[in-house]
Each structure stands twice: as C-alpha cells, then as structure tokens.
Image (cartoon, helix red, strand yellow):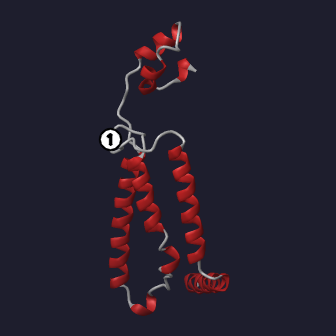
Amino acid sequence: MCGTVRACEFHALKDRCVGRNTVHVQKLKCTQTQSDCDLTLKLLIAIFIGRVLFEVTLALTKPEDRPEIDWRASSWIWPWLGGTLLIGFLGRYGNVGFQNILPDWWDLATVAVFSLVVFYFAVSLASPAEKVLAMVEATKAELADEEAELSI
C-alpha cells in the first residue's frame, strides 16, 4: 500500500511505511488538487452561463419555433447542484474550499441521504409517461419532415 499512496497521504502513513516504499513516497511532492467544492462551483458557474445563453436563445427565437419545455421536470437540478456544493464545502477533500466539518463516515451518510432525497424529489417532478411519449413522437415527425425537405 505504501508504494502507491499519493504524496499528500504520506505524512499520515509514514510511520507504517518501511523500506524502499518509504523512499519512493518521500520523493513525491504534494501537488495542489481541486476539491469537490471547487469543481462543483466551476460546474455550477458553467451551467448558469449555459442557462443564460439558453434563455437568450429562447427570447430571440420566434414563438412558433420554440420547443415545449417542461421547467417543472428539470427543477430538481438546482437543489441538487446547491446541495452538492454545500456538501463539498463542508467536506474534507482538496486543498482549497473545504471546511473539514463532516467527519469520516458521516460524509458518506450525508451524501447517501442527500442523493436519495434528490432522487425521490426528481422522480416526483418527472413528466408523465404519456407526455414524454407524445414529445418523442412529435420529435420523430419533425425529424422525418426535415429529412424529407433535405432529400428534395
């Protein structure tokens, strides 16, 4: 195990590592890594920018050309991203942006419970199967029309 540990883990394991594995680990340098909180924040910013671009595109599209959007079915995404960001902030991974508040095993339990809550929330917001099938059929018809126009 000692030969494959990351350099950041060396300090916690140095008393257990012996022989050439210790020398190998000591030569490694601890590099900056991005924490879950850092990555989630960047993802949240990118999704927000995408949402703004999507809204601008919708506003510039003629009403008859706009697709039907079920905002309710997608409303679980923002609480999920916010909760993931909060859990990452309270977590203990990474060098920047974490508070180390959630101890071992409690972090795992927190993620499991949060995931189940978001899952059931998302399922409760899902579009009815009939509506989804109708939208799929409408999209198939639209694609067939476009293919017919292109083949002429």
Residue 40 on image: x %, y %: 40, 53
Q: Amino acid at mark 1?
A: Val
- Is the residue 133 above or below the residue 85 in the image? below
Q: Mark 1 highlights which residue? A: 96
Picture coordinates of residue 23 (x, y %)?
Answer: 46, 10
In the image, residue 6 lies at what x, y percent? 47, 26
| 143 vs 96: above or below | below
**134 on left or right of 92:** right
Quarter of the N terminus within the rendering: top right
Residue reaching furthest bottom? 64
Q: Between 70 and 95, which is closer to the camera in this rendering? A: 95
Q: Quadrant of the C terminus?
A: bottom right
Residues 1 and 28: in front is 1
Instruction: Judge by depth and name the residue closer to the eye, 79 or 106.
Output: 106
Q: Position of residue 64 (x, y in %)?
A: 44, 93
Left or right: residue 8 compared with residue 106? left
Q: Is residue 102 above or below residue 10?
A: below
Identity of the residue drawn at 45% across and 21% down: 10
Drawn side of residue 70 relative to residue 31, left or right? right
